[in-house]
Image: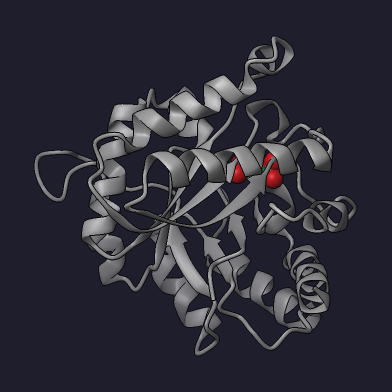
């Protein structure tokens, strides 16, 4: 089962938070299949979160990896290290990393290769800025981000793309669901037509997803799930969003 509903906890959390979150989550999640769910805590807490989640098959991942495997790179964490901790995926190229830490598409490309070499599924984030959206260049910008990130990758056994408009992250604003659907269709077309050796599993949407808007997003044919920041910090809300996703997908 591909990873469909993913929590990005960003720079939040503690051991007490992990325990409380899991309590709220398990009280409210009514599904039986945990393997479509993912959580990306701060890397420091991966081990503790895994012990709190126990035997439930919720995937744990990191929010970033380094572009090298080893070396004199103080403060970095490699794909092999997160794999060693039992992670199955990593978010790569989140807009906060692109903007605050100056990550380029070329660096992102190297990170994708690292992830693939270590059997970690990359969740590649792409998205346009507010200005790009207003000037109707969204498709062009996304296409360029995809091409630059993938053009030097020979092969990827699995790839998840998260479409995250920069202006929608943490703002309470989202494009309308039909717009997102057409962007996702375009992303699938570009990857499948230009990069036949890349195993694109799914395209998630991210940017102010919450319990109120989740249903209308999940109804769209090309929205395969969600990457959720703020709303994922509440174990109850994350569980209820996952329940909505399951209800809809089981009906289809
Ligand atoms: C994110 O940062 O990946 C994200 C989607 O955040 P939020 O849900 O808070 O907009």
Q: Nearer the viewer, residue 10 or 117?
A: 117
The x, y position of residue 42, in whole percent, is: 46, 54
For image coordinates 69% across by 9% down, the residue present is 135
On the picture, is 150 further left or further right than 46? left
Which quarter of the picture shows residue 93?
A: top left
Can you tell me which quadrant of the image ligand 1 is in? top right
Residue drawn at point x = 54 percent, y = 21 percent: 141
Most distant residue in the right direction: 212
Query: For the N terminus, which image quadrant?
Result: bottom right
Q: Residue at x 24, y 36 (%)?
A: 152
User: Is residue 38 left or right of 72 when viewed as pictured?
Assistant: right
Q: Is residue 4 above or below residue 177?
A: below
Q: Is residue 224 above or below residue 104?
A: below
Residue 193 image-quadrant placement: top left
Quadrant in the rendering for residue 105:
top left
What residue sits 87% from the left and 53% below the top? 216
Residue 171, position as x, y percentages in the image: 76, 31
Residue furthest toward the front? 193
Residue 81 lies, in percent from the top left, at: 24, 61
Q: Quadrant of the C terminus?
A: bottom right
State the image coordinates of residue 131 (x, y, percent, origin top left). 67, 11
Q: Indicate whether 200 appears above or below 97.
A: below
For the rendered model, the colour scheme is: one colour
The mark total stands at 0
**Side of 251 relative to 114 (left or right):** right
């Amino acid at each position: 089962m591909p990873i469909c509903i993913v929590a990005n906890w960003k720079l939040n959390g503690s051991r007490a938070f992990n325990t409380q979150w899991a309590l709220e989550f398990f009280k409210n999640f009514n599904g039986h299949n945990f393997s479509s769910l993912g959580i990306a805590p701060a890397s420091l807490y991966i081990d503790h979160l895994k012990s709190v989640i126990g035997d439930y098959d919720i995937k744990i991942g990191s929010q970033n990896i380094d572009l090298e495997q080893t070396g004199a790179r103080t403060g970095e964490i490699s794909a092999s290290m997160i794999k060693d901790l039992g992670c199955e995926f990593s978010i790569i190229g989140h807009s906060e990393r692109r903007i605050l830490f100056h990550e380029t598409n070329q660096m992102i490309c190297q990170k994708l290769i690292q992830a693939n070499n270590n059997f970690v599924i990359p969740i590649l984030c792409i998205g346009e800025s507010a200005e790009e959206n207003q000037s109707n260049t969204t498709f062009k910008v996304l296409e360029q981000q995809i091409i630059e990130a993938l053009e030097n990758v020979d092969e990827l056994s699995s790839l998840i793309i998260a479409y995250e408009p920069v202006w929608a992250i943490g703002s309470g604003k989202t494009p309308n669901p039909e717009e997102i659907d057409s962007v996702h269709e375009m992303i699938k077309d570009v990857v499948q037509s230009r990069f036949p050796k890349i195993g694109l599993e799914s395209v998630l949407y991210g940017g102010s997803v919450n319990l109120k808007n989740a249903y209308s997003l999940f109804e769209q044919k090309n929205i395969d799930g969600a990457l959720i920041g703020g709303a994922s910090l509440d174990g109850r809300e994350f569980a209820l969003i996952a329940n909505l996703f399951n209800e809809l997908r089981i009906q289809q």
